[in-house]
Image (tube, rainbow, N blue to C red):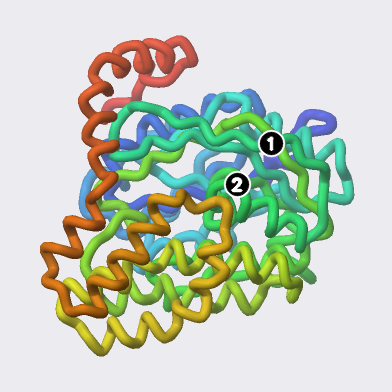
Amino acid sequence: MSERTKTQKKGEELISVVIPVYNVAEYLPQCLESVCGQIYKELEILLVDDGSADRSGEICDAWALKDDRIRVIHKKNGGVSSARNEGLKAASGSLIGFVDSDDWLEPEMYEKLAAALREMPGADMAVCGFVDYPYGIDVPVPKGLKPHPPCGTADTVIALFERGGYFTSLWNKLFRRSAVFPGDRMVPFETDLSFGEDEVWLARVLRGCRQTVFVPEALYHWRPRAGSVTRYTGITEKQLSLLKAKGRALKLLPRRNDVLELAEGRIFNDCYFLVLEAYCAKERDVYRRVKRKLWPMRKAWLKSGDVPKLRKVKVILMDMEMRLGMPEKVIRFTDGINKNTGKMLKQSAGNKRGRLQSDRKKKGYGNNRIQI
């Protein structure tokens, strides 16, 4: 047990924050500023340097000298699941959270999540909203949560699926240790998955969660960026592991019709791009294999009220074009029908970026960055 647990403030439990780090030197200081600057001070910050080839490892070590709550683990590159597993093995807190090293947090995030769990002793997971930055620009899209009463596993899954894909993330959640280490045995991340490993892990942990509590505010800033593992193109077995992961997660979910229908609709929506990429890459065997797995879920996707009508029309049209053997450029043109939205947002971003940066400075981000 960590020495820090002996000196905790009354009523505050130690939170172990696991942060896998790999080649994020450009973003890591902002992430660490936001974690170290949390109002909630009883933190154990576990930085797992997964064999970074840039200055990320050096930055981790420098921050550990600056803040004694930080512990750095350097390891050979093994992927994000391997890094998270190492972080969990080292965690001693009674509460556990995860942060992606290219994102950042509002100062009160862990304060509010921990308070929600403290007020509901029967809950094992707390969830908050987040701020998305689509198209790689500084135009935030807050995704807060509608007020929702504490609920059990099946209703938690529905609540997460119905709120813009929260089910696929770990970073806007705080877990009781007993849910992550049931019977003192760690729920591990599956290292054979390149994508979707967090979804499988969450589905497994939820099976042992008694209740979930929801914090409405958007307190986590998620930065989807070019080159990160959640943004990819092309078709490889590595990308196909996303479909494998979602299949594993589906088998772990409560066997309730409304849960399974929502999950199947989400899987079709999230994995349809694999059909598109396989066709455009002229990988006809892969194209047929993915379609066989996805098409039984198409009906649930068409019924989903969360999917914009334009997207449904586009997919139906692209499917028709692919069945007719149309060339790749026709498929790509159809797929790009509504992508001008991103271009327009980029053009308007310049006018807003200055104000956003000013707001961040007022909240303490961007100041006193450690230089090494």
Could you tell me the amino acid type at mark 1?
Lys
Q: Between marks 2 and 1, how big is the CA–CA gap?
A: 8 Å
- What is the crowding at mark 1: few (fewer than 14 residues within 10 Å), some, or many (at least 20)? few
Camera-side residue of 86 and 137: 137
Q: Residue at x 52, y 65 (%)?
A: 301
Indicate which disc, 2 or 1, sits on the residue closer to the N terminus: 1
Residue under label 2: 163
Q: Quadrant of residue 265?
A: bottom right
Could you tell me the amino acid type at mark 2?
Arg
> From this viewpoint, is residue 77 visible?
no
> From this viewpoint, is residue 364 visible?
yes
Camera-side residue of 196 and 291: 291
Residue under label 1: 146
- What is the crowding at mark 2: few (fewer than 14 residues within 10 Å), some, or many (at least 20)? some
Left or right, residue 243 beside residue 145: left
Camera-side residue of 323 and 187: 323
Camera-side residue of 47 and 117: 117
